[in-house]
């Protein structure tokens, strides 16, 4: 399945290829001098016809260019050589197919590495220069590089080739870096908030408890001291579980699995580690999501399951992914003790994870809905607009 970026790149390249072909046809018909002077009219029509069929085939049979296999490189090079030979055969720098010959360079800039696009741009300029320098004095089809507008055309063509090779790649690179930088900043803020609301508060509570133990020992109240030590042990165990789960969550982020197998693996590991069975369901028509949306959905599920472990006292959990006509939804439902929704307005330390879930959902243009009541379990439903998260 093509990514959204690939589809948009194909649409742009297809539009440009059709326009470049239409301009070439117009130039050869309106300005006949642009075709090779010694070329019969029937030969020109054959070239236009074959190129038209080739253009249609290229537009309607796109490959997965971003896989960058040997075949995609060979097809790219073949397209480049065909375009260059076409330009050389039809008058070089005076060819009506100059704009058409930029297509392989633009394809490389959008879907391959920058060095590939730059190499094609340099090769095209060198080929045209050598052609006019070598054949300008021996063939009437090619004029000397310093005659007429040849040098100006060569400079303009070279400039356009390198701009087409550099600008798309650099633009995409800058956008990707900005997105990554913003994601890193958001993740740092989230980790800082979790440390403050989790580990920091636990350490503060432990400090208070140790003082109470010290006071109990000083007053020789052994029973109270043992009770306080039991509380300390429980807090240490809970803090250990929180840190271990945070490490597991961060480890899950760096995996290259799509959202469905990643969530399936995580829910299985969560159930095994916490003795809470988790049922994971996904609708058959679930769409392919953008990497950012997949990561955020995974993190939302992790936050929701962490809250289940900490507070719900649940014996069963259901995690479900589904698509409606306008949204992608994730449901995390448990059969635990539930709570009063009014408690969320007081922002108690125990429920900071729900605020994080809300922030993540709103960051993707979505919403969070919580259904719960004491003794009736909790249902967390995240709804994301499908057009913003689908590839």
Image: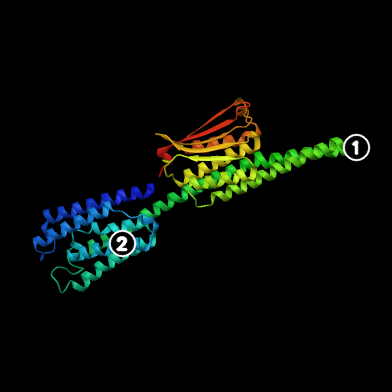
Residue 44: where, in percent of width, then height?
Answer: 13, 60
Q: Residues within 10 Å of mark 2 (few under 14, many from 20)?
A: some
**Residue 149, visible in the rendered structure:** no
* Residue 96 screen position, x and y as percent: 18, 58
- Residues marked 2 and 1 touching at CB (< 8 Å): no
Residue lying at 63% horizontally and 36% vertically, measured from the top left: 315
Residue at 18% from the left image edge and 69% from the top image edge: 144
Could you tell which of marks 2 and 1 lies nearer the N-terminus?
A: 2
Q: Quadrant of residue 169?
A: bottom left
Q: Please name the residue shown 59% across and 46% down the image.
A: 269
The image shows residue 325, relative to residue 66, as above or below, that is above
Considering only vertical position in the picture, is 1 above or below 357?
Answer: below
- Quarter occupied by residue 24: bottom left
Please tell me whether mark 1 sits on a helix, a strand or a loop: loop
Picture quadrant of residue 93: bottom left
Of 238 and 166, nearer the camera is 238
Residue 178 in view (yes/no): yes
Q: Is residue 45 left or right of residue 295?
A: left
Q: Quadrant of the C terminus?
A: top left
Residue displayed at 53% across by 38% down: 319
Pointer 2: what residue?
75
SS state under label 2: helix
Q: Is residue 208 left or right of residue 314?
A: right
User: What percent of the width, then of the height, locates residue 77?
Assistant: 31, 64
Q: Is residue 140 left or right of residue 269?
A: left
- C-alpha separation, residue under disc 2 versus residue under disc 1: 85 Å
How many neighbours does mark 1 have within 10 angstroms: few (below 14), some (14-19), or many (20 or more)?
few
Which residue is disc 1 drawn over?
Answer: 220
Q: Position of residue 268 (x, y in %)?
A: 57, 45
């Amino acid at each position: 399945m093509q990514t959204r970026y690939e589809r948009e790149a194909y649409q742009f390249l297809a539009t440009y290829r059709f326009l470049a072909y239409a301009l070439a046809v117009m130039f050869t018909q309106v300005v006949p001098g642009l075709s090779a002077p010694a070329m019969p009219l029937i030969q020109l029509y054959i070239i236009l016809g074959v190129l038209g069929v080739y253009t249609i085939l290229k537009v309607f049979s796109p490959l997965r260019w971003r896989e960058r296999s040997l075949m995609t490189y060979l097809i790219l090079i073949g397209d480049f050589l065909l375009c260059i030979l076409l330009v050389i055969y039809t008058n070089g720098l005076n060819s009506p197919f100059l704009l058409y010959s930029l297509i392989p360079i633009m394809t490389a800039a959008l879907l391959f590495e920058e060095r590939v696009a730059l190499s094609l741009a340099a090769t095209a300029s060198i080929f045209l220069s050598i052609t006019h320098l070598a054949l300008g004095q021996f063939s009437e089809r090619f004029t000397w590089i310093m005659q007429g507008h040849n040098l100006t055309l060569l400079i303009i063509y070279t400039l356009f080739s390198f701009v087409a090779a550099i600008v798309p790649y650099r633009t995409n690179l800058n956008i990707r870096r900005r997105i990554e930088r913003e994601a890193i900043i958001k993740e740092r803020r989230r980790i800082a908030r979790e440390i403050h609301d989790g580990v920091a508060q636990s350490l503060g509570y432990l400090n208070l408890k140790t003082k109470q133990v010290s006071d109990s020992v000083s007053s020789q109240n052994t029973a109270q001291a043992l009770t306080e030590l039991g509380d300390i042990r429980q807090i240490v165990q809970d803090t250990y579980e929180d840190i271990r789960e945070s490490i597991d969550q961060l480890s899950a982020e760096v995996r290259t699995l799509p959202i469905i197998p990643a969530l399936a693996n995580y829910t299985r590991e969560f159930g095994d580690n916490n003795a809470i069975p988790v049922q994971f369901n996904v609708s058959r028509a679930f769409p392919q999501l953008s990497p950012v949306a997949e990561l955020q959905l995974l993190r939302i599920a992790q936050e929701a399951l962490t809250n289940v472990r900490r507070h719900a006292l649940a014996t069963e959990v259901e995690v479900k992914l589904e698509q409606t006509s306008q949204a992608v939804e994730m449901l995390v439902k448990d059969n635990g003790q539930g709570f009063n929704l009014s408690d969320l307005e007081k922002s108690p330390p125990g429920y900071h994870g729900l605020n994080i879930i809300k922030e993540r959902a709103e960051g993707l243009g979505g919403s969070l809905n919580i259904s719960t009541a004491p003794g009736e379990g909790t249902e967390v439903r995240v709804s994301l607009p499908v057009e913003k998260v689908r590839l």
